[in-house]
Image: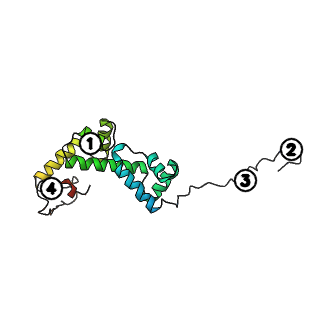
Amino acid sequence: TPTSADPGKTAPCPPDARRPTLTRVRPTASLPPAVLHDVVALARARLGEGISVTDLADHAHYSPFHFTRLFTASVGIAPGLFLGALRLDAAKRLLLAGNDAVIDVASAVGFDSLSSFSRRFRQCVGVPPASLRRVADRVADRPPRPFALADRRRDTVRIHAHVPAAAGPAACASVWEI
């Protein structure tokens, strides 16, 4: 509003005037189920091609930013993390089911670098890719044994696993819930 002293100037805000606080509103919108299904199917089908969040957003006809918000609201994790989880899941399955070299597995699931694949795999799974095979072989060769928790103040926990006879000692890795 113009001041009476100078009709061309506006009066400054009074010092005690409060500006409205902006609050972050969580998105309530989510991807339509059919679009979400198509996007997940595309991600699974083109996993080895190095598909990106931008590719998924283009397929869904959204901008990458808006797609990321909608996908996160629908699934609960960001699409980049989802793609990473799909890649590592596929890598675990390939490592356990076959004898391909680790570099071939890394390439098959969309990693360009063996070192980045190995580092990411170890971070998420807890063991390096080649060690996963050795651990799986050791577990498959022996029946499960009772174990004690590292914290001796707690009671011992015993686990008795019942494996179906059809699984056999050299069962396919697809019976594992990975």
What residue lies at 32% left-to-right and 42% top-to-bottom? 120
Question: Mark 1 against mark 3, which lies toward the viewer?
Answer: 1
- Which tag is nearer the camera, tag 4 or tag 3? 4
Tag 2 residue: 8
Q: Which dot, 2 or 1, sits closer to the camera?
A: 1
Image side of residue 102 versus residue 47, left or right: left
Residue that label 3 marks:
17
Q: Secondary structure at mark 1?
A: helix
Going by the numbered disc 2, the residue's amino acid type is Gly
Give residue 47's mark.
Answer: none
Q: Residue at x 21, y 46 (%)?
A: 132
Q: Using residue 26 as the reference point, say whether residue 178 is left or right of it.
A: left
Q: Amino acid at mark 1?
A: Val
Q: Which numbered disc flags the more N-terminal residue, 4 or 1?
A: 1
CA distance for labels 4 and 1: 21 Å
C-alpha distance separating marks 2 and 4: 85 Å
- Identify the image quadrant of the C terminus: bottom left
Residue 3 x/y as whole percent: 86, 48
Identify the residue under disc 4: 171
* Amino acid bearing label 4: Ala
Closer to the observer: label 2 or label 3?
A: 2
Task: Decide: few, some or many residues near mark 1? Use Cα within 10 Å; few <14, some 14-19, many ≥20.
Answer: many
- Is 113 left, or right, of 17 in this rendering? left
Q: Which residue is mark 1?
A: 105
Of 28 and 20, nearer the camera is 28
Identify the secondary structure beneath mark 2: loop
* First in sequence: mark 4 vs mark 3: 3
- Mark 1 touching mark 3, by CB under 8 A? no
Between residue 148 and residue 3, name the one nearer to us: 3
Instruction: Tell me the amino acid under the disc marked 3.
Output: Ala
Q: Are marks 2 and 1 in contact (CB under 8 Å)?
A: no
